[in-house]
Image (cartoon, rainbow, N blue to C red):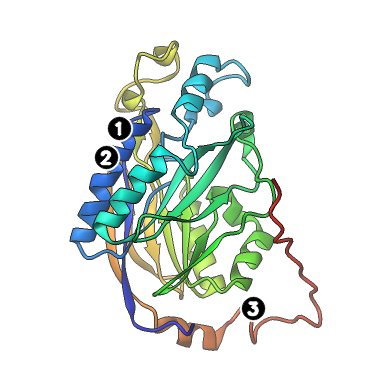
Amino acid sequence: MNPSGSVTVAAVQTTPVFLDRDATIERISGEILAAAHDGAELVVFGEAVVPGYPDWVWRRPAWSDRDWYLRLYDQAVDIPGPATERLGAAAREAGVYVAVGVTERVASGTLYNSLLYLDPDGNVAGVHRKLIATGGERTVWGHAAGPSLTVVPTPFGRLGGLICWENLMPLARAAMYEQGVDIYVAPTWDNSDAWISTLRHVAREGRMFVIGTNTCLRGSDVPRTIPGADEIYGGDDDWMSRGNTAIIGPDGSVLAGPISERSGMLVAKLDLGALVLERRQFDPVGHYARPDVFDFHTNHTELA
């Protein structure tokens, strides 16, 4: 499908109800409806926002987080399951596509950092599991079983993306480009100044729109019912995530944002016809590729 027309997208920088799956989904459901009211046809949320990113892995010694992990496991999301049904109901009521980061729980017991896609009928349209958990994340999340490089066809183009530092993996990006992604989502926990530069580079390299989403969360948002919360988290000045949400054009220009130190929503109308002219100049898997020089193969076989 040749990209044409336009689509309105919303990048939501929410504050989850930390480690409370149902309350967070209720909040997100309201934000989905609010985004649709503003004309959005695609609504994107941050990394692992349901039930909240396990920030303590950067603050506690490895394997010393029994109570935290048990709460994360209890509040994780089964796909499919009641949580996806509730999120799907919100997508269906709003009539929009949704991309939302979740901690996914599977029958074997492993947790994954996953990106869940829902269609306007409320169905699960796809799931991407983070290929490699970063640093302390490896004590709570497993690596994806198989490539898990999901792309979702939509009426407004092909939708896909990578999670956080997967976006720094050149071959992972190349595998996404090969699938013809037009709108690329990049949920993250990265609050660094360099992150916006990463989003701009990915957009310019892939000649696609990039929706970068993050979370706004302070130490005061952590429930004190978790043993040891007061020891590692402070108040409003203790930022877990300041946010970095932005929408980037296929030439690397910043179309909206970034949002920092507050919850909020960015809404932008994307001119999909711009992709044609940008790819005329540079198409990483077309005329600017050299298959005679580079032999690139992606394993698309999903493993159990």
Report how far apart the C-alphas of labels 1 and 2 lie in the structure. Answer: 6 Å
Give the residue displayed 36% in from the left and 23% down from the top: 222
- Quick check: 68 above or below 53? above
Q: Residue 37, how many percent across, how many down?
A: 18, 59
Q: Which residue carries the number 1 mark?
A: 23
Say which amino acid is labelled 1.
Ala
Q: Quadrant of residue 263?
A: top left
Say which amino acid is labelled 3.
Val
- Quick check: 184 above or below 207? above
Return the residue nearer the eye: 79 or 140: 79
Residue 122 can be seen in this image: yes
Give the residue displayed 29% in from the left and 27% down from the top: 236
Q: Which circle's residue, 3 or 1, is located before the other in the chain?
A: 1
Residue extending furthest toward the left: 37
Q: Residue 42, how many percent across, how many down?
A: 34, 62
Q: Residue 210, how many percent across, how many down?
A: 45, 64
